Every structure is written in structure tokens, then in C-alpha cells.
């Protein structure tokens, strides 16, 4: 006889590491085993015979595991086919098993079975049945009643043994056993690291998990004195929970309805932990309606079908939210001592930016979100732009205008950060604008990844052109980097070394404020141009890595008044930046200075090309002396001849070789970080020009 069957498998939404579907003869013999692995976003196909696993076939999936709503297993005797995510995966059992029926095991999921006509007619009793409809023990099964346990079952859950008594629902017992066996320990980790249930009589745990009471039992095991409200879906579930509590002498578990949960949240007092699957999907409207003071008393341990935005989560006491494919928002009140508002402030440094600043600020605001706010720093403008911006946004609480005496762009950016009360900070230029919801998505990405820095793409915008938008060099550089998904968008990870050599782009990033503070990274206020260079070098060096949302764009406006297009003496501020960079690298013992050397020579090359002719010679000589200093610190392997030759100024090589020869009697070493020749400042250049004119 050949058995032909189709199984449709539906993985559970929620928190699990693996989900498998398999045929079992016994625990030691599993002729077919298919598993989805959340962490690696992969599948695995295998079999077990006599407790020994066979050769595993596995590969990555294109679609995140959490987004796979179902897949199919087709059986034709001993031959099986798995259809998943556009793939067709063949598998063949031993031919002697073609007519066998098996026990089906499906953890963290459900399945439906569809029988085809068998090649040889077989009695109906021989067809494999779904586990939920397994044959009832004669001692407890009766016609029209649910299957029940015929004896006590002991399950080890959450660090202790629980008795599931005889007479309890057998299907729910099996589900609970599977959940306990596959529990990755995340709940215990969450509970053991959070200030929850202190004191117990002031704290309530609401368990809204409708499938199995695993985490409810875990809560009572960890905090036996806490008040526990257990939401159930029907009378059978209520009876199952009650039976467990009675068998284990557990007190203080209250069976409740959703209406009672909502009442507790809206009118109750004291701390509350809401735990279980899809809290925000099922209770989002209730949570949105709570006051900020009440929200600060709530903690969450849950999963979500999609990313829950930060403004839906905060304020809260604690949170751990799992979202597909592997994103986790993790907030611990016990280590968050900053007292800052959870959100991102975007500081706009604005000096005489009347033509652009209102458009810039408007583009930053995100629909439906009050956790993305704008601080316009009017840096002593004389065109009235600060007043007009304040008037325009007078009814918009998410935008405020701060005023200060003129001190330059670096000063304005630092001031915006100083007056911000947010956990995250961003900086933009007043003449640019961004794609809708960009900073909200970058902030959410920072929350769910923990990254110190997240960023978007950028392009150029020139309204004098027929096609005003045109791409940056990154479109080609990053096009082959593997993507994940976040909020339905592609996202990829960059190592700092991948972008440290690129154009300084501090304006399309979101930074964790505690990261900047702990690393003592600020904009250098003694310079009045190109302050973004050193800020980018320091942040990318200190950050572990950077996550990027390439479908969001910072539109970098091109116009004649831009600072970078003025070939004046402000380019000499680059020397300050280079010196600070080398000094910090030496002080902190950075292990690899080569990427910074490449960045320095690229910057020298660019400035030399745009400088006015009467300034170029002085700039070339000063920067050549500086590059000699780098070689004398790090050697020719870092400041190499090929880098020197990339500088497209014929006199640069001459100056470099000449200074190298002149200083050959001075020993190599880190002292070169503090002496690389005379400092040539923009102020010095201006004074020398004035003297020439006078004389």
C-alpha cells in the first residue's frame, strides 16, 4: 500500500527558537524531520534512526521565518516533498516505510491533513491522524468528550516541577509539554534581570497568552506571592489552569476576561507586567488610551507580528518585545538611570536659512508620532528666519526654536544636543530634507538592534536640474550587501571600516545619546567649517557597527551658497581635524590607522581641487608635513607611497619627500602626533592676506 497525504503546517506566531514537523515511530526513530530555525532564518531536513541523526540538509530562507504563515509536506509513500518559500525540497525515507503510518509531532505550530486516495484501499483506522485527535485512553475517553490524562504527568517548567493531574485535558497537556521542552529560557532571563514584583503585594502580572499557561506558571514559580491574572479563551482552558493550580497548591491565580484586564490597566494602581503573545496587537488601543503616569508603571514581555514603534512602547518600566525575524526591543528600568525621554530629537543648525529651514523641519516630523521632535537652533541669524520658524510652528508641540549668539555650526549642533531631553539625537543641515518617517524608522531600528548608530541612504538634490535627484556613490558600493527586513524594509549591517573612508555624513544618522556622552564625542567648536569630519571619525571608531535603511533618503541639497563649495581659507580647519584624529588614535591605541590615513589623503585631495589658487600651495605644504608625521608614527605601511600618489597635486609629492628628508634625523614615535610642523589656521591665512594687501 502507498499512502498519499498532504500536510499544511502553520507555524505559531510568538516566541520560539525552532518549529518542527516530523514523523515518529518512537523518540529514537524519526524517519522524517523538518525544522525552521528562527535565529539563523534557515530550514533543516533530516531523519533519526536508533537515536542517530542522518546527514542534515539545510539552507537559508529568503523570507524571514516569522513571515512564513504556512508550508506544505506532500507524502507519496516513502517519497516526501517540502514546499516552502518558493522552494521544492525532495526527501526519501526507507522504501520499507512506504505503507507505514506514523505519529505526527508538530511543535510551535498546527497542521491540517488532507488524504488522497491511496493506491491500495486501506481501512480508515490506518490513516494517520492529527495529534490533537489521537486515540483516547479507554479509562478516560467517552463519546463526545475531550481526551484527558489517565494519570498525573510531571513537567519540568521554569526551573521547577509541576504536576498536571489526571483528568486534565490531554491535548493541552501535550502542548504545554512541547512548550516547556522548547522554551529557550528567555522568560527566566527577563524576569531575573528586571525589578519586577518588589514588593509583591503592590505588583500584578497579567498573562494574556491564550495557548498554554507556561509563562503564567513560571511567574508563580519565581514570584509565588504576586497577584496573577490569567486570561483564558474558553471554559476548557480555565479548567486546565485551575487543575494545575490545585494540583500544585498554587494560590493567587485569578481567571479573568479581557474586560477585566482592561479595567485593571485603566483604573488600577501599582506596577503591572503584561506577558504573553501579541500584547500590542490585542490591547494596543487600551494602552494608547492610558496616561503617561500609568504607562510608566507597565512592563511588557511579549511578541509582535510586526515592529511595535517606540511611541507605542514608551513610556514604560521594562520591556522585551520579540518581532520577526529576529528583532528584540529590550528595555531595563534598573539600568536606565538617565531619566531622559524615550525618543529622538533632531537638531537643525540654522544660520540665515530662511529659504529652507521650515521645509527641512516639516520633512522630519513623522505622522502619528510624538517621540520624533525637532529643535531648530537659531545660531544668531540676521534674516529673521528664527522668528518666522517660531511663528510657523507655534501650534506644533513637536518643534521648538532655540536661540543663541552666533558661534558656528559646531556650536549650534552641540547646543541642540545640550538642550535635548531625548535618549537619541540626530543632526541635520537646515537646507536639506528627508523622506517621510525616516527618523522614526531609524529610531525604531536603534531600539530593536541596540546599535549606537543607525543611518539612511543619501542622495543629491539640485532643483536647477531637469532631474533634481541623483544618487550618491553608495548606490554602487553597497548594492551587493545581504539584506534583512525591518518594518517591511530592507536593512543591512555595515562595519565602521566600510564607511569611515566615505564622505562625512553625520546628518543622516541617529545616535544613542548615552553612547556619545560616554565616549566624550562632541563637535569641535573652535572650528567654523568641516566639523562633521572629526565627529564622523570618532563616532564610527567607537561604534560597534552601523545598521542602514537604504530605502530612506536624506536629500542633500546642492546650491551655490554651500560652505563646501567655497574654496576659501576655511579648508585649513582640516588641519585641526587631522591633528585631533591622530592625537586621539595615539591616546586610545587604535589598532589600525590605515582606513583613517586613506580618509585623510582623500580629504586633502578633495580640498586641494576646490581651493582658490592663491591658497593651494600653503595648504599642500602644510598637509604634506602632516602626512610625514603620520608616516613617522605608523610607518610606510599605513601612510604608504600609493596613498601619497593618489593626491592629484604635482607639488604634494615633492613637499612630502623634501620634508621626509629634512626630518630624517628626528626619531620616529608617537610624539609626531603632537608636532607636525607649524599650525596654519584660517585666521593666520586671513592676516597674511591683509598684510600683503597693505603692503
Image (cartoon, rainbow, N blue to C red):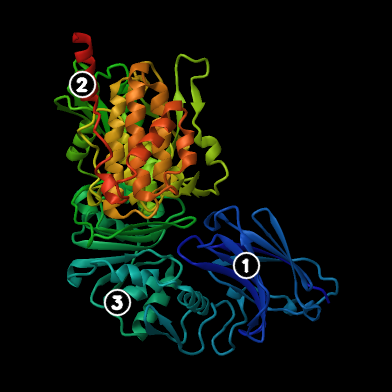
Where residue 44 is drawn, which disc sits there? 1
The answer for how far apart the CA atoms under marks 2 and 1 are is: 61 Å
Residue pushed farthest left?
Answer: 405
Neighbour tally class for label 3: few under 14, some 14-19, many 20 plus, Cα within 10 Å: some
Give percent across and percent down for residue 626. 33, 37
Cα distance in 3D space between marks 1 and 3 = 35 Å
* Residue designated by label 3: 222
Q: Is residue 122 left or right of residue 675?
A: right
Which is nearer the N-term, disc 2 or disc 3?
3
Q: Who comes first in sequence, dot 1 or dot 3?
A: 1
Residue 414, position as x, y percentages in the image? 21, 36
Q: Is residue 556 above or below residue 416?
A: above
Residue at the extreme right:
120
Q: Position of residue 387 (x, y in %)?
A: 19, 19
Nearer-the-camera pick, 161 or 309: 309
Q: Which mark is residue 386?
A: 2
Amino acid at each position: 500500500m502507498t499512502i498519499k497525504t498532504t500536510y499544511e503546517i502553520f507555524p505559531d506566531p510568538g516566541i520560539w527558537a525552532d518549529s518542527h514537523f516530523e514523523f515518529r515511530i518512537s523518540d529514537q526513530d524519526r524517519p522524517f524531520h523538518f525544522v525552521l530555525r528562527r535565529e539563523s532564518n534557515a530550514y533543516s531536513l533530516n531523519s533519526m534512526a536508533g537515536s542517530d541523526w542522518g546527514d542534515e540538509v539545510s539552507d537559508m530562507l529568503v523570507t524571514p521565518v516569522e513571515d512564513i504563515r504556512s508550508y506544505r509536506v506532500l507524502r507519496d509513500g516513502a517519497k516526501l516533498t517540502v514546499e516552502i518559500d518558493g522552494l521544492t525540497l525532495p526527501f526519501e525515507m526507507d522504501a520499507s516505510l512506504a505503507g507505514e503510518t506514523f505519529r505526527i509531532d508538530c511543535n510551535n505550530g498546527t497542521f491540517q491533513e488532507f488524504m488522497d486516495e491511496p493506491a491500495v484501499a486501506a481501512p480508515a483506522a490506518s490513516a494517520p491522524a492529527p495529534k490533537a485527535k489521537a486515540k483516547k485512553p479507554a479509562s478516560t475517553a467517552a463519546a463526545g468528550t475531550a481526551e484527558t490524562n489517565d494519570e498525573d504527568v510531571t513537567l519540568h517548567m521554569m526551573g521547577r516541577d509541576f504536576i498536571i493531574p489526571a483528568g486534565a485535558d490531554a491535548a493541552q497537556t501535550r502542548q504545554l509539554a512541547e512548550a516547556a521542552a522548547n522554551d529557550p529560557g528567555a522568560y527566566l532571563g527577563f524576569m531575573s534581570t528586571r525589578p519586577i514584583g518588589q514588593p509583591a503585594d503592590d505588583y500584578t502580572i497579567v498573562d494574556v497568552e491564550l495557548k498554554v499557561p507556561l509563562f503564567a506558571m513560571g511567574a508563580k514559580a519565581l514570584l509565588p506571592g504576586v497577584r496573577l491574572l490569567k486570561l483564558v479563551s474558553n471554559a476548557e482552558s480555565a479548567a486546565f489552569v485551575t487543575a494545575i493550580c490545585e494540583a500544585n497548591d498554587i494560590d493567587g491565580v485569578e481567571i479573568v476576561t479581557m474586560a477585566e484586564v482592561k479595567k485593571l490597566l485603566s483604573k488600577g494602581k501599582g506596577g503591572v507586567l503584561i506577558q504573553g503573545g501579541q500584547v500590542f496587537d490585542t490591547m494596543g488601543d487600551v494602552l494608547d488610551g492610558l496616561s503617561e503616569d500609568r504607562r510608566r508603571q507597565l512592563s511588557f514581555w511579549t511578541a509582535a507580528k510586526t515592529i511595535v514603534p517606540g511611541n507605542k512602547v514608551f513610556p514604560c518600566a521594562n520591556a522585551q518585545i520579540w518581532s520577526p525575524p529576529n528583532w528584540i526591543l529590550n528595555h531595563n528600568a534598573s539600568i536606565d538611570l538617565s531619566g531622559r525621554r524615550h525618543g529622538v530629537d533632531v537638531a537643525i543648525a540654522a544660520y540665515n536659512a530662511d529659504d529652507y529651514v521650515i521645509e527641512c523641519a516639516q520633512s522630519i516630523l513623522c505622522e502619528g508620532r510624538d517621540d520624533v521632535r525637532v529643535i531648530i537652533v537659531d545660531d544668531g541669524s540676521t534674516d529673521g528666519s528664527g522668528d518666522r520658524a517660531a511663528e510657523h510652528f507655534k501650534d506644533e508641540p513637536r518643534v521648538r526654536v532655540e536661540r543663541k549668539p552666533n558661534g558656528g555650526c559646531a556650536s549650534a549642533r552641540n547646543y541642540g544636543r545640550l538642550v535635548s531631553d531625548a535618549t537619541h539625537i540626530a543632526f541635520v543641515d537646515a537646507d536639506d530634507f528627508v523622506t517621510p518617517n525616516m527618523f522614526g524608522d531609524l529610531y525604531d531600528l536603534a531600539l530593536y538592534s541596540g546599535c549606537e548608530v543607525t543611518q539612511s541612504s543619501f542622495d543629491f538634490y539640485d532643483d536647477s536640474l531637469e532631474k533634481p535627484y541623483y544618487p550618491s556613490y553608495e548606490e554602487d558600493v553597497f548594492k551587493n550587501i545581504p539584506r534583512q527586513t525591518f518594518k517591511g524594509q530592507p536593512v543591512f549591517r555595515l562595519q565602521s571600516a566600510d564607511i569611515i573612508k566615505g564622505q562625512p555624513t553625520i546628518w543622516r544618522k541617529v545616535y544613542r545619546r548615552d553612547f556619545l556622552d560616554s565616549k566624550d564625542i562632541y563637535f569641535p567648536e573652535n572650528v567654523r567649517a568641516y566639523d562633521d569630519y572629526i565627529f564622523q571619525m570618532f563616532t564610527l571608531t567607537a561604534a560597534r557597527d552601523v545598521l542602514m535603511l537604504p530605502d530612506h533618503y536624506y536629500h542633500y541639497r546642492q546650491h551655490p551658497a554651500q560652505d563646501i563649495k567655497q574654496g576659501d581659507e576655511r579648508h585649513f580647519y582640516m588641519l585641526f581635524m587631522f591633528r585631533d584624529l591622530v592625537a586621539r588614535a595615539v591616546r586610545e591605541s587604535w589598532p589600525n590607522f590605515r582606513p583613517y590615513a586613506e580618509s585623510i589623503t582623500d580629504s586633502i585631495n578633495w580640498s586641494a581641487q576646490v581651493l582658490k589658487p592663491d591658497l593651494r600651495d600653503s595648504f599642500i605644504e602644510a598637509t604634506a608635513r602632516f602626512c610625514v608625521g603620520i608616516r613617522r608614527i605608523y610607518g610606510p605601511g599605513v601612510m604608504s607611497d600609493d596613498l601619497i600618489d593618489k593626491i592629484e597635486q604635482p607639488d604634494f609629492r615633492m613637499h612630502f619627500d623634501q620634508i621626509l628628508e629634512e626630518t630624517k634625523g628626528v626619531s620616529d614615535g608617537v610624539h609626531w602626533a603632537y608636532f607636525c610642523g607649524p599650525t596654519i589656521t584660517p585666521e593666520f591665512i586671513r592676516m597674511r592676506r591683509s598684510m600683503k594687501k597693505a603692503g
